[in-house]
Image (tube, grey):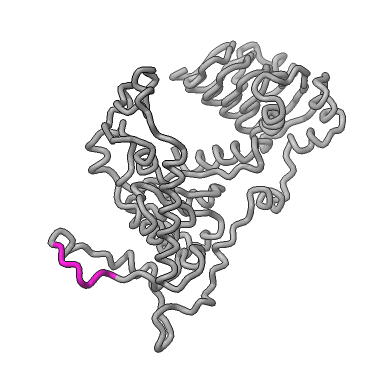
Amino acid sequence: YSIEDLAHVIYDLHYINPRAAVSVKLVSEEGIGTVASGVAKAGADIIQISGHDGGTGASPAASIKHAGSPWELGLVEAHSVLRKNGLRDRVLLRADGGLKSGWDVVMAAAMGAEEYGFGTIALIAEGCIMARICHTNKCPVGVTTQNEALRKRFVGTPEHVVTFFQFVAEEVRHILAKLGYRSLEEIIGRPGLLQPRKSLSLRKVSRLDVSYLLTSLTCMPETGENFCDVDIDRSWLEHKSVETKRKESGVITVDERLLSDALMQKAINEHDKYNRAYHLVNTDRSAFARISGVLTEKYGDNGFEGSLEFDLTGAAGQSFGAFLSRGMDLNLKGYANDYVGKGMAGGVISIRAPEEELIQTKRSLALAGNTLLYGATGGKLFIGGRVGERFAVRNSGGLAVVEGMGDHG
């Protein structure tokens, strides 16, 4: 809905897995540079610029042919705007959308991309014939179907795809050798490499203005030189790891404090019982998601046989109990913000009002915000009061009991 909402999603994903890099995909279009700057400030690690030439076989032909713009335009704009705003070192740029050859990789690198996505062409390498009926379960060559008779027609092998990418890599090497460079990294976003083809006289491109694309990647070489000085500042190519960014933030989260408890570590490792009281404040976002991530990484969805119980007070921040795992029991006497139980797969969350406030009022209190149980696939949620709007709109398996809700629930 907004950059702020996206920032919170990115925070949640970093929180549950502090080692994972978060990628945000943007469609190549006018103004993508401004959006890319917002995404970089929101904390994304990778920005993927997707051009109009891509699209699965299930996409409508009108969308494939007439939606979006070339990845070249979007990539150049995103790269140049990020550099001008001092944000380029925060994110890694990835380009995709119809890339087919080593030439495309070199062009994307010269325009600022550091990673390159191949989709449709990789499918063709393993046997896809672009029948464009992927969504019908009737793929004639058995690539995208569950029909056993059709699947027997599939003759593709991993070696086909590996061989294709070996040829792509070899083409990249040949082009780099002709240009006089030893690695692809040396030409990433390097100004002065691109020039318009003066010998091209096609009518359909005769009035095409590519000045922005070229001027955004231009430079002023020294007299007598063809290219810019190799010592030009390229520190923006050095990206910090996700863990390094987290450590430099200096923020110690609720889950980090709890996970530092030796008794909790013992309970996790030995499937034992653990109980802890804790006071939350509304800046404690995504509380207990990291613990859920640890349990899931160690035991999978249902492997933990112990019990982690937490008796909580105060006001929880957004995404309280997000991605909750089996074996966790959160009992909160207080209030919670939006997205309680988002993506939860197990465990129990119960919220009730503080006793002193129950004494002062005889009516049901609003105890949690909007969009609870968004994407939940399991677990239980009990709230002794009312909640906000869009309650459980994307719930796919969680059990919930509340005393009242807002619109669209």
Depth check: give the residue in front, 182 or 322: 182
Span of residues in magenta:
196-202
Q: In which quarter of the image is the N terminus?
A: top left
Residue at (67, 34) in percent of width and height = 282
Quadrant for residue 295, please give it: top right
Find out whether residue 56 is within the magenta segment.
no
Specify whether 378 is left or right of 271. left
Q: Position of residue 50 (x, y in %)?
A: 38, 47
Residue 111 appears in the picture as rendered: yes
Q: Work out whether 112 lies above or below 43.
A: below
Q: Work out whether 250 lies above or below 186.
A: above
Quadrant for residue 344, please give it: top right
Please identify the dominant SS of the magenta region: loop
Specify whether 182 is left or right of 221. right
Q: Position of residue 277 (x, y in %)?
A: 81, 25
Residue at (57, 29) in percent of width and height = 338
Residue at (55, 60) in percent of width and height = 89
Q: Position of residue 385 (x, y in %)?
A: 61, 15
Specify whether 112 is left or right of 378. left
Q: Work out whether 62 lies above or below 243.
A: above
User: Farthest bottom residue?
Assistant: 223
Q: Position of residue 370 (x, y in %)?
A: 53, 26
Find out whether residue 200 is within the magenta segment.
yes
Specify whether 184 is left or right of 195. right
